[in-house]
Image: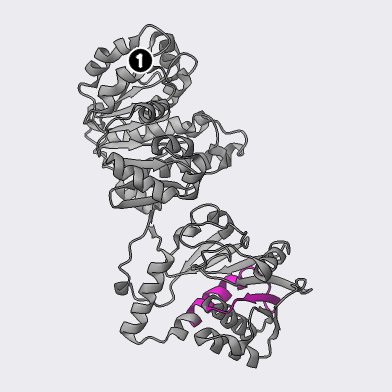
Amino acid sequence: MIKTISPQDMQEMEHAFLDGTGYPSILLMEHASEAVVSALADRVPKGASVLFVCGSGNNGGDGCAAARLWIQRGGQAEVWLLKSPSQMKGDAGINALLLSACGARMRIVYGDVPEIPEGVAGIVDALFGTGLARPLDGTALEIVERINGSGLPVISVDIPSGVDGATGKAAGGAVQATETVTFHRAKHGHFLYPGREFTGKLKIVDIGILSEWDGAEGIDILEKEDASALLPERPRNSHKGTFGHVLVVAGSEGMSGAAVLCTRAALRAGAGLVTTACTFPSLSVLQTGAPCAMAKVVSDIDHIEAASEGALRELMEGKTALAIGPGLGRNEDTWTAILPLIESDLPKVIDADALYLLARHGGKVGRNTVLTPHAGEMARLCGTDTQAVLNSPVETAQQLASEMNCCVLLKGATTVIAQGEELAMNITGSEAMATGGSGDVLTGMIAGLLAQGCPPSDAARLGAYFHGLAGETAADDMGSRAVTAMDICERIRIE
């Protein structure tokens, strides 16, 4: 599992390690620089000329040390500095002076930024590290623009310069890295947008900090082995009742497809049985589109109405999980019908139109509930605007999870999942999943996992992870423009 760390926690942990062990800080810088040069060697020819752009702090010190190591490997180094070596302090100053002694071509960039030197095969970005929390401007911004316009492979040291390591924000622009080499643990900003876009390929390297000195909290990011370990067992001597029974409450006239997608996804996720409560106009669509599930008509009109409440209460009996909302419609009497389900103790997923109605009317949900809003739905639930959600997705998800006492899955290119003290992000998926119905598939998957006994936080993380993998597979098979939600559903593979 990848576990990210905030820049502040990283700094405090590093200082504690150095103070507690007496380990030389300059040796950590050397280890970091060795990793940068190793990544560089995979991107440019041996002996090539490389431009190293170095700030005046420790990130710049890493860059100076990397330039020295590159020269020692037989390469050539062009070096741009924001300050002269004599003005740089601590380990950074030592490495800048050592580099000068090695005969590197060094240039102090104070005002006008020169063109990228001819003949260089790559660039190492060591301007600013993970602690930068302000927009780039002046000379630094001009340098970044030169780097981004070069068309050359770029290795960023720790984080692309201009990206906030805590939030991923890059208000004044940032280096577009080909690859980022980060140290000890990934930072939050490597995975939060737009930082994730600037990071390129991420390489996490050990620089010698002993694990017993690292007790910092972070954000979990599932990898394949972690996801597989969270899945409930499926004994060979099982039957359909072993793996739970999902009740899907979804669909209305013109939106029956949402109910089909959600229903099929719950089955694909491993639920033993699925029953979908539907309107009469949706029945034939459901029976045709999801023949492996059962369907029960609870309304004869085009939407689930207040009079459906009794039938829905009866259908809840014997169910192990609920999926409420896809294509449900936003009629006032629909809220009356589904409110007992929303407030029930059954594990449940609330999505789409049910989220709209929840935001409009308010109500209580429990810890066994997963809310799956996108940014716009999240804004309605929190009484804010969409941009505010996009600016602070982690904090917003945590706040709503605390207020509603449930699990919140905030959908996006990087999905944030929060419940209590648990915090995770999901990074699987692709742009191919930006298609109508994709969220309905996710809702069904999470419900199917809940039905099998997964706790809400695990079901949300697993659903997001395998949903993203299905989207990636669909994109590989069909190209990102051709993928539909049904294509994603048909490629669900949970193992």
In the image, 193 versus 245, the foreground residue is 193
Residue 452 location, quadrant:
top left
Q: From the viewer's side, name the closer residue of 238 and 461.
A: 461
Which residue corresponds to the image point at 60% horizontal and 76% vertical from the top-left?
A: 55
Q: Amino acid at mark 1?
A: Asp
Whether residue 276 is in magenta: the answer is: no
Along the horizontal axis of the image, is 471 left or right of 15? right
Name the element at disc 1: helix
Residue 351 in the image: above or below residue 283: below
Magenta stretch, residue numbers: 30-57
Rendered view: 85 above or below 334:
below
Viewer-proximal residue, 49 or 326? 326
**Taking 99 as reference, is 170 above or below it?**
above
Magenta-colored stretch includes residue 39: yes
Q: Is residue 270 visible?
A: no
Taking the view exactly as shown, the residue that stands out farthest to the top is 300
Outermost residue to the bottom:
101
| Colour logic | one colour
Q: Position of residue 102 (x, y in %)?
A: 64, 91
Q: Is residue 45 visible?
A: yes
Which quadrant would residue 298 be assigned to in this image? top left
For disc 1, the neighbor class at 10 Å (few under 14, some 14 to 19, many from 20) is some
Residue at screen point 42% across, 22% down: 259
Find residue 262 and report its horizontal and vertical position in percent: 41, 27
- From the viewer's perspective, is 300 left or right of 341? right
Tell me how many marks there are. Answer: 1
Q: Could you say where residue 223 lies in the image, as x and y percent from the top left?
A: 40, 53
Q: Report the quarter where the N terminus lies.
A: bottom left
Residue marked by disc 1: 333
Quadrant of the snapshot with the C terminus: top left
Residue occupying the point 55% across, 61% down: 163
Q: Where 384 sits versus 184, above or below?
A: above
